[in-house]
Amino acid sequence: MYVPQEIYLYKTLVMPVLNNGAEIWGYHLALDVESINSKFCRKILSIKRSTNLTALYGELGIVPLNVHRKILMIKYWLKLLTLNENSILFRTYKLFRSDANDGNTYGGGNWASHIQKILEEHGFAYFWTYQDYRLINFNSIKQRILDCYNMAWHNDINKSELKSYCSY
């Protein structure tokens, strides 16, 4: 598949900056960051703001940044699971995990509860329950997140006036 140079440069140079630190703050909607992403996509294709964003992402082969942020958060979570149990970072995570298991989300600010939600939404609740990093395959979680996005993308296209778009 041909990837225009602008998209390649955007994915490798700009998207990492937009998602800088997303391992921690990635559960926020970050509408301003998503706006930059959609403005770039529209500029590449020279189209109006009123163009369907779902079709725009499909045309360029770009997924919304919130999908990338979920993947970054899961990757960081797996890194936390490999830390020494005496490290302050791991002990802090254990406290957040315990609170997440008890349903204490601190008004949506408990990072561990967001990891739990991501895993449950994508059919990996058992990874949250056992948290044995040796049994967890990051690539399978990443692929499932992308697959879920792709299914939602097709669903959105089929619900819109662009039904013939995805039949090509």
Image: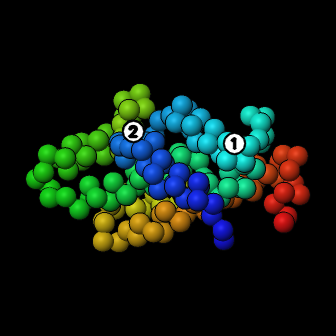
Does dot 1 land on a helix, a strand or a loop?
helix
Q: Which residue is mark 2?
A: 25
Quadrant where the image shows the N terminus? bottom right
Residue depicted at 83% across the width and 48% down the height: 159
Chosen colour scheme: rainbow
Dot 2 amino acid type: Trp
Q: Percent from the top left, x then y, of residue 82?
A: 23, 62
Residue depicted at 47% across the width and 35% down the height: 28
Quadrant where the image shows the C terminus? bottom right
Say which of 34 and 127 sits in front.
34
Image quarter of residue 148: bottom right
Q: Which residue is mark 1?
A: 42
Mark 1 Cα within 10 Å, few/some/many (few <14, many 20+)? some
Spot the residue most to the top: 107
Say which of 52 and 132 sits in front.
52
Mark 2 vs 1: CB contact within 8 A: no
Q: Percent from the top left, x then y, of residue 156?
A: 76, 49
